[in-house]
Amino acid sequence: MWEPELPRPLPAHFLQEIFSTAPIYDLILCDLSPRTLVWLSRTCRRAHEAVTRFVCRAYNINRHLSRYFPDPLAFRSLQARTGLVISGSNALQFLDRSFYPESDLDLYAHPGHVYEALEWLESVGYKFQPTSWQYQDWHDDVSADWDGTERRIDRHGQMTINLEPNMVYSDVAGVYTFTRPAAMDTETVMLKVQIIATKCNPIQTITQFHSTCVMNIITFDAAYSFYPVTTFEERMAIQIPGSNRLDAVAKYVQRGWRVYAVFGPEHVNHPKLFLLNEKRWVGDHHCWSIPLDTTGVTPRPALSLSSERFSWDPSIQNGWRMECEGDSATGHVPAMRTHLVMATVFRYNYSLPDLELAKVIRCWSLSQGRLNHAELTKQNWIWCVHLDQTTASH
């Protein structure tokens, strides 16, 4: 009886030649998922070197941003000094190595940096496109004189910030849309960039997005995916209640993601899939983190003479916890839990996954705040720039 001949293993020199020739191995690696790339890189030295070189080319942030900005390094320098964060579909495209021609660029700004971000966009040729309820000139709405030494939470625990009407997300203070025509190949396209002013900080807003597949960010020095296995390996997401963005959910279903309204039995029985009830931090070992080349990026200047040097992005000191509410009868619904620290001793606001840690930091900030407010001026304010790294380590 005839039996098929077993395939012969490829000669070692043949594999070495493949992984030494970029035009060949690029065609192979471009179709592999992030996890498969990692697995392949661990098989041998040649494969590791090939994957490393491929990743540098595939995740070239300057090339990615050049669609929107003629000088990507100038934009990333703006990110470095303001903590401006890229998220939404653009960050997803970068990590997924995909392209949605109809998508825009969403930039999330910390309180106090919105004016600088809007001014910079205008300086590179973008024009403000107000909505029906916005001023025709954004300068009439956004102040350049944000004072971080003023109280950020009132005596009732509410954030002291004015909101635009019709905000879809409760953590958003305002959205400012800018457009610019640009020549792309043989046609002219209208590029759109949106600055989203956050009430607390970008991470607090992003963890309240409509679904987990868009919980990805790009800072000036790294890209992070909060749920990389479910997003890029399983191509699934869980809908987060409260966003009211069913149109956005439908858009990502059309792009190939399976979005669930509630947790199924497999999610509840295997909580590691969505990392239920775990304290999460941006950049922790559950995240997919890609360091970016910062050559040519201008670092952040000192906040004041008496403040510590701030060389990192404040996003990495924020976290969250995804919990599961309800039961099998009513449905297992996801809930994103954070605990806010909004104190005048910190330049930025923080959202933490740990209530006890938040209480400790709030208590300490009250004592430090008494010193600052009693003895210091805005010019010599002591800005505390990081949390307790031993307690909040990644």
Image (cartoon, rainbow, N blue to C red):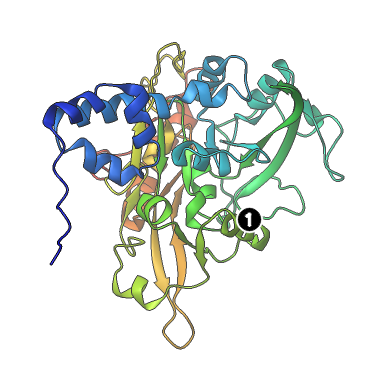
Q: Quadrant of residue 327?
A: bottom left
Indicate whether 310 appears above or below 29.
above
Q: Which residue is mark 1?
A: 251
Along the horizontal axis of the image, is 288 left or right of 122? left
Indicate whether 208 appears above or below 348.
below
Could you tell me if residue 86 is visible in this image? Answer: yes
> Alpha-carbon neighbours of circle 1 within 10 Å: few (<14), some, or many (≥20)?
few
Which quadrant, please, contains the N terminus? bottom left
Indicate whether 392 appears above or below 107.
below
Residue 338 image position (x, y, % from top left): 43, 56
SS class of the residue under badge 1?
Answer: helix
Along the horizontal axis of the image, is 379 left or right of 388? right
As shown in the figure, which amino acid type bears the numbered disc 1? Lys
Q: Quadrant of residue 236?
A: bottom left
Q: Quadrant of residue 24?
A: top left
Between 84 and 103, the one nearer to me in the picture = 103
The residue lying furthest to the bottom in this view is: 329
Residue 297 image position (x, y, % from top left): 46, 15
| Residue in view at x 43 percent, y 37 percent | 315
Between 137 and 195, the one nearer to me in the picture = 195
Residue 181 image position (x, y, % from top left): 77, 24
| Residue in view at x 65 percent, y 40 percent | 103
